[in-house]
Amino acid sequence: MTYLPTLLLVAPPREGGNGAIIFLVQMVIFVGIFYLLLIRPQQKQAKQRQAMIDAVKKGDEVVTNGGIVGRVVSTSEHRVTVETAGSKVEVDRLGIARVVDGSEEAARR
């Protein structure tokens, strides 16, 4: 009785060429699930982040990846100047972690 499950797991393939087709179908399903669960959401998140970075304008309050919170004073193609506590810091656009909107600011107070 203990050999029955192991015999089912290592049973020889059936006669015919269906084994390769079944394997290919399983691989296509696996890749499809992988795409839907991992790749597609990551691409969507990257597009949202890029749109947020491109929309940064003068007067926005931002938080950098380093944790610096400040207001945008000027922007250029690749850099943003952020004023925080009287000093100005020039940051690469990709260094912006998020833009703080009014609802987040009210929640902090």
Image (cartoon, helix red, strand yellow):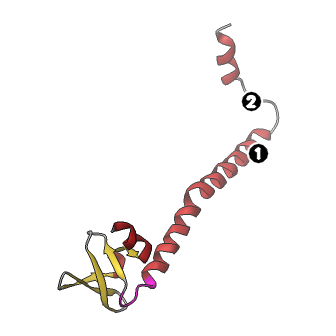
- Identify the magenta region: 54-59
Residue underneath mark 1: 21
Picture quadrant of residue 43: bottom right
Front residue of 59/57: it is 59
Q: What amino acid type is highlighted by mark number 2? A: Pro
Relative image position of residue 46 (x, y in whole percent): 49, 70
Which tag, 1 or 2, sits closer to the chain's start? 2
Q: Is residue 101 left or right of residue 26?
A: left
Prevailing SS of the magenta stretch: loop
Point out the image quarter for the C terminus. bottom left
- Marks 1/2 in contact by CB < 8 Å: the verdict is no
Quarter of image, res 61 = bottom left
Residue positioned most to the right:
16
Give the x, y percent position of residue 103: 44, 72
Residue at the spot 55% in from the left edge and 56% down from the top edge = 38
Q: Is residue 47 left or right of residue 59?
A: right
Q: CA distance from mark 1 to mark 2?
A: 13 Å
The quarter of the image holding the N terminus is: top right
Residue at image mark 2:
13
Mark 2, secondary structure of its residue:
loop
Can the viewer see residue 47?
yes
Q: Which mark is residue 4?
A: none
Q: Based on the picture, tell me whether residue 56 belongs to the magenta stretch.
A: yes
Q: Nearer the viewer, residue 36 or 108?
A: 108
Q: Position of residue 25 (x, y in %)?
A: 73, 48
Q: Is residue 9 left or right of residue 51?
A: right
Foreground residue, 46 or 83? Answer: 83
Q: Residue at 64% across / 49% down in the picture?
A: 30
Q: Is residue 50 left or right of residue 31?
A: left
Crowd tier of the residue under label 1, counting other residues whose Cα lies within 10 Å: few below 14, some 14–19, many 20 or above: few
Asked if residue 86 lies in the magenta stretch, the reply is no
| Residue drawn at x 39%, y 67% as measured from the top left | 107
